[in-house]
Amino acid sequence: MNQRILGRSVVRKEDERLVTGRGRYVGDIHPEGLLHARFVRSDVAHGSVTSVDVDAAREAPGVVAVLTAEDVPLVPLPVDGTDLPPVPRPLLAGDRVRHVGEPVAVVIGETEQAAFDAAELVWPDIDPLPPLVEPDQAASGEPIHTEFGSNVVERSSVGNFDPDQPWEFEVDVTLTVRNQRLAPVPIEPLAALGVPEGEGVTLYVTHQAAHRLRDALSRILPFPVEVVVPDVGGGFGMKGRFFPEYAVVALAAHRLGRPVRWLQTRRESMVCGTHGRDMVHTVRIAGDRDGRIRRVWISILASTGAYPHTGAQVPRYTRLVSQEMYDVPELRVDIQTVLTNTAPTAPYRGAGRPEAAYAMERAVDRFARACGLDPIDVRRKNLIDTHRLPLTTIVGARYDSGDYRKAVDAAVRLIDLDRWRSEQRRRREEGGNPIGIGLGAFVERAGGPPESGEYARVQIDEDGTVRVFSGAVSNGQGHETAFAQVAAEVFSVPIDRVEVIEGDTRVVPRGWGSMASRSAQIGGSAILRVSTRLRDRLREVAAAMLEASPSDLELSDGRFVVAGVPSAGVDLEEVIARAKAEGLETWEEEFYSPGAQTFPYGVHAAVVEVELDTGEVRLLDMVAVDDCGTVINPMIVEGQTHGSLAQGIGQALFEQVQYDDQGQLRTATLMDYALPHSTDLPFFRTARLETPAPSNPLGAKGAGEGGCIGAPPAVVNAVLDALWPYGVEHLDMPLRPAVVWEALQRASGGQEA
Ligand code: MCN
């Protein structure tokens, strides 16, 4: 009897290729006659373009073409997640520029150097207009897109109380917290290579959603487009969307009849890749002195940047999970989403859920302190009980399954709370740098729109290879292994006999893509469903071959055998040959939609030490307890949690995209934008609960994002726990030494704390 492979920590098949430099990225593809694209970008945040002088560039050596707005179409870009009409978005800016880095022209050269040099000769003449950088300033400012008449993309309220009604509670506190703007910083920035093929273009592109990009490009471009995604060096949400550069590269390749490649530089990626977060929450939380929360009012102010594309959805994601794991009787969430003269925002790992968790978890801690109670006790007092699940929250989320109390208890045990509390007391009594313990509890949603789905086709070829075609697109998440495990389990074959094919619209007809931690639960379930159907068909064929009843057959080690008679059996290959001879299909396909999202959850806990003299925060311990339903591969899930925790800690302590008041980016390189180093991170300790999701046959929930949702509130709450006795009640991320030190100085009235 072969062992189960689903649920096992199988080493990732793709890693040998990826870590030995044999991955094939867009930059590794060098077709015959390759040309190189370099974009010329606006260096002002807001302005009227009076002319773009390209004469000198066109004459420069090695230049094949220079394109401006006149050469490319104006694209109606849907404003995802809102009821607004599409915004006409220029692929190359025409009469207006709306953020620093907006592409104005493109130079196509025989070599990368020729294109770079000639781009320096393009002179966009731009009359600056006053930029609107901060959302509160932009909300009442002159419209950035005149056709909207306002910069407010969305103003909405959902909840079960009117904020004007009396607030008669024993405890009532208000706080404002900021989720600063972040850059996703994948190792591989954006990249696209257009190759003319037949009547159209095949675009090789580093992306998360091959089919949706193909469909978006096909709506814009007057020729057929196919999309191929080779290996991807991380996406983190940034690569899930349409970028004007992709359409320009495809257009240029088509016009010139030669392959054209654009490799985004790191600086370009920082300036005009998308950014994430950039949301301010004002939270009013009220209740009884014994720690019972009665009412929460959350007001969100969010920036979409200059073009309201996918970033406009994110505040709605925040709202959906804003009740978190608490049994709050009254909740209201107001959203105001605003255009600004900054790079467009978009979902960045966590996408709206880190913002929600940070706001609620900071508020719960503050409420607990106002009650004079331990924040962990207050959480326990307000948790939604397991027997109430499934439950529809006040803001419309359908929490599916789980045990929130168990997760809190597990995190408290894992972090060894009692030991740290006694160390904390000892330091308070004996002096020394203070330590603090903080929790970040969250419920998130995975899966994307409930009506979305994922494509799978599973076929078995005559040599016995199982081929899995999926509409998902791995950016490093390990689908080649995890998806192979699903099919291998069904057909009872080693995973090496399963080949996973993703990200190629020429051979995978449909697909949604990988974002919202949806691939395991939807893509994996699709593979399970079609594999099971195919296996059952093959079982019938095998039964006929063995002259046995299908129900008497077992499938083991790639062989159908009659139960109890191991010598009576047929290999899958023989069954496939017979099926083919009989004209039966040896494949199955489906676009599977579970019709529901899943709601993974977790409780993360951090212990920090704060250096009083310098404000430096040292993470002493960090634990994460997560429930992502049934797990396909625990080692992959663990890796996902580690990576995501690192990004969450990056938000808490280091990272921030900063603009000056003219909309110039001050953090355009990795010298200015502080990513965490491995030495900044403690050894993570994790634990898992496994409550199957009822909505999909695998029982899986999303695992790709949890870490960056729980870590920021856990770390910041821990720092505030350490500094509370020193009078520090509030800090805004990132908690760099200067921020903490200044807060300490302010709290102590300039005296040494
Ligand atoms: N998995 C599992 N069991 C589960 C859930 C997931 O074994 N119950 C496995 C999956 O099979 C998959 C991995 O864990 O190999 C992540 O699965 P899932 O949660 O379904 O997420 P997706 O594959 O859809 O990936 C998207 C998610 C998001 S939204 C971002 S952003 C993100 C992330 O994954 N970006 C990443 N993880 C990333 N990891 C890498 N290396 N690079 C990125 O860009």
Image (cartoon, rainbow, N blue to C red):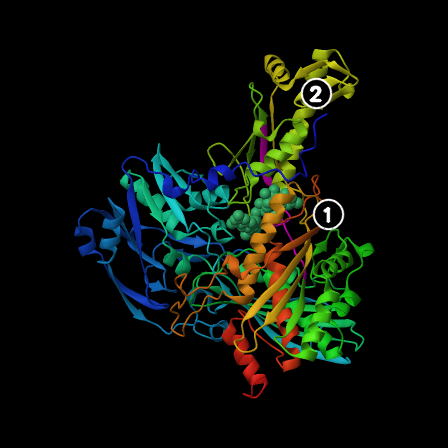
**Image quadrant for the C terminus?**
bottom right
Q: Which residues are magenta?
A: 441-458
Answer whether residue 84 is visible to the viewer in this image: no
Q: Decide which of 95, 676 is in the foreground and name it.
A: 676
Q: Please report contact status of discs 2 and 1: CB closer than 8 Å, yes or no.
A: no
Number of the front mark, 2 or 1: 1
Q: Is residue 740 above or below residue 687?
A: below
Residue 539: which disc?
Answer: 2
Neighbor class of circle 1 (other Cα within 10 Å; few <14, some 14-19, many 20+) is some
Q: Which residue does the numbered mark 1 point to in the structure image?
A: 690
Q: Nearer the viewer, residue 412 or 109?
A: 412
Residue at 72% from the left image edge and 79% from the top image edge = 370
Is residue 35 left or right of 611 when viewed as pictured?
left
Q: Amino acid at mark 1?
A: Glu
- At label 2, the amino acid type is Arg
- Foreground pick, 532 / 4: 4
Q: What percent of the width, then of the height, locates residue 310?
A: 51, 56
* Percent of width and height locating residue 114: 23, 49
The reply to whether residue 290 is visible in this rendering is: yes
**Dot 2: within a 10 Å radius of its alpha carbon, few (fewer than 14), some, or many (20 or more) residues?**
many
Query: Which image quadrant is residue 661 in?
Result: bottom left
Counting residues from the start of the chain, the first of labels 2 and 1 encountered is: 2
Task: Tell me the SS state at disc 1.
Answer: loop
Q: Nearer the viewer, residue 507 or 721?
A: 721
Residue 198 falls left or right of residue 219:
left
Label 2 and label 1: CA atoms lie apart by 31 Å
Which quarter of the picture shows residue 352?
bottom right
